[in-house]
Amino acid sequence: MALDPGTLSQLIGTIRRFVDERLIPAETEVAESDAIPDEIVAGMRDLGLFGLTAPEDYGGLGLTMEEEVLAVFELGRAAPAFRSMFATNVGIGMQGIAIDGTPEQKAKYLPGLASGDIIGSFALTEPEVGSDAGSVRTTARREGDAYVLNGTKRFITNATHASLFTVMARTDPSQKGAAGVSAFAVERGTPGLSTGKVEKKMGQQGAHVCDVIFEDCRVPASALIGGVEGQGFKTAMKVLDKGRLHIAAACVGLSERILDDMLAYAVGRRQFGRPLADFQLLQAMFADSKADAYAARCMVLDAARKRDAGEDVSVEASCAKMFASEAVGRIADRNVQVHGGNGYIREYRAEQLYRDARLFRIYEGTTQIQQIIIAKALTAEAKARAGL
Ligand SMILES: Cc1cc2nc3c(=O)[nH]c(=O)nc-3n(C[C@H](O)[C@H](O)[C@H](O)COP(=O)(O)OP(=O)(O)OC[C@H]3O[C@@H](n4cnc5c(N)ncnc54)[C@H](O)[C@@H]3O)c2cc1C
């Protein structure tokens, strides 16, 4: 349900202060220790960040898509590792249950996910299954009133902290594609479930990914999300549609933050007797960055409003995710250039944000996968118009 304008602007203001006063000052500590301090995680819980999108009936704020992206524009201004801490609860680790779960599954898990007492992870990717997400190899074999899971999931965000996993597994081996895949809610502590070593990543230190391994992991039949086999890929796609707008909004926030950093540096540093900001070649970078960030913001807001109005926004979500993630990459690169040698030095934030931003073009569907989704829809429409 939409918040009234006063409550919404209060929420956005509170998040902005939290980002400015708590998150941005802790960026160096988090990058160096590869961990988010407990008191910051507690602050996130107090602010309700884990439950931004969980339905109100289950203790969440139940934000609309437009409200969510407005909140994420602010949250995205901090180094992306912070958002990662609660993003799986807000998005891919919770939405499968919120959208397609049975009433029992919702009642069991959503309150804990909304409060942040349960950290949820989304386990789709496998060593041999990435962009071709419908070809999941992890199996879930029905045995009486249980399913037995076998397989390995790769690069699973927050898997080390998670107590609940939304797992995509093949229930029908005779169906090679997406139709044979089902989604399961699997609790940590289930015998046969283990997690691998935490991967060393290019950026986003403080956010963690690792393998999740299933070896004869037996879960009750009631763990099947929605209670119907073969719906898992559809659930995953619904989750990713919303997730792509969330990621695009995070890219907008980071773009705007980096542009602020770029300008602050260019105003303060002098060469040839003048501030860097006076040089037209650099001004072109400011202008291009502003246009990139503004275009991304407009796309995200437009797509979010359409989704709230009940429209199918899979093309718009892919456009927004592709454009905003590529845009933040360009802006982060220009920021390094504007910083000159300092842009390459760890003490300045430019090189960290450059590395952090790189991931946005890869996960929740690479740029190439977004291009395929967009182009497939366009060509199908064109063929229909041509009567083919
Ligand atoms: C830090 C991090 C966190 C992640 N978190 C999660 C998570 O929480 N849960 C989860 O399930 N997954 C997660 N992932 C996995 C992520 O979603 C995948 O890495 C991503 O979808 C790409 O899959 P892949 O790595 O197998 O690359 P591949 O699919 O092997 O792709 C390699 C390259 O080929 C291109 N390509 C592939 N197919 C085509 C095609 N048909 N046409 C043109 N180009 C193509 C791709 O665009 C890419 O450039 C995470 C990954 C990382 C790195």
Image: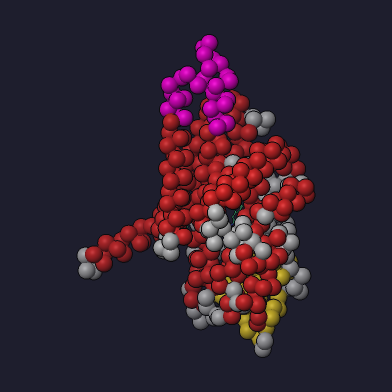
The residue that appears at 71% across and 59% down in the rendered structure is 116
Q: Is residue 277 covered in magenta?
A: yes
Magenta span covers which residues? 260-286
Q: In the image, is residue 344 above or below residue 179?
A: above
Tell me what residue is drawn at x 51 percent, y 44 percent.
252
Query: Can residue 365 be seen?
Result: yes
Tally of numbered discs: 0
Where residue 229 appears, as percent x and y from the top left, is 55, 80
Residue found at x 52% / y 13%: 274
Q: Is residue 310 magenta?
A: no
Q: Is residue 329 visible?
A: no
Residue drawn at x 43%, y 31% is: 287
Given residues 295 and 352, the one toward you in this image is 295
* Nearer-the-camera pick, 101 or 131: 101
| In the rendered image, the vertical position of residue 59 relative to residue 332, given as above or below | below
Query: Is residue 23 or residue 365 the one in the foreground?
Result: 23
Can you give x and y, in whole percent of width and height, for residue 331 in the image? 50, 36
**Front one among 57 and 90:** 57
**Can you give x and y, in whole percent of width and height, for residue 248 in the image?**
50, 50
Q: Quadrant of the N terminus?
A: bottom right
Q: Is 36 placed left or right of 236 in the picture?
A: right
Residue extending farthest to the bottom is 144
Q: Quadrant of the C terminus?
A: bottom left
Q: Position of residue 300 (x, y in %)?
A: 46, 50
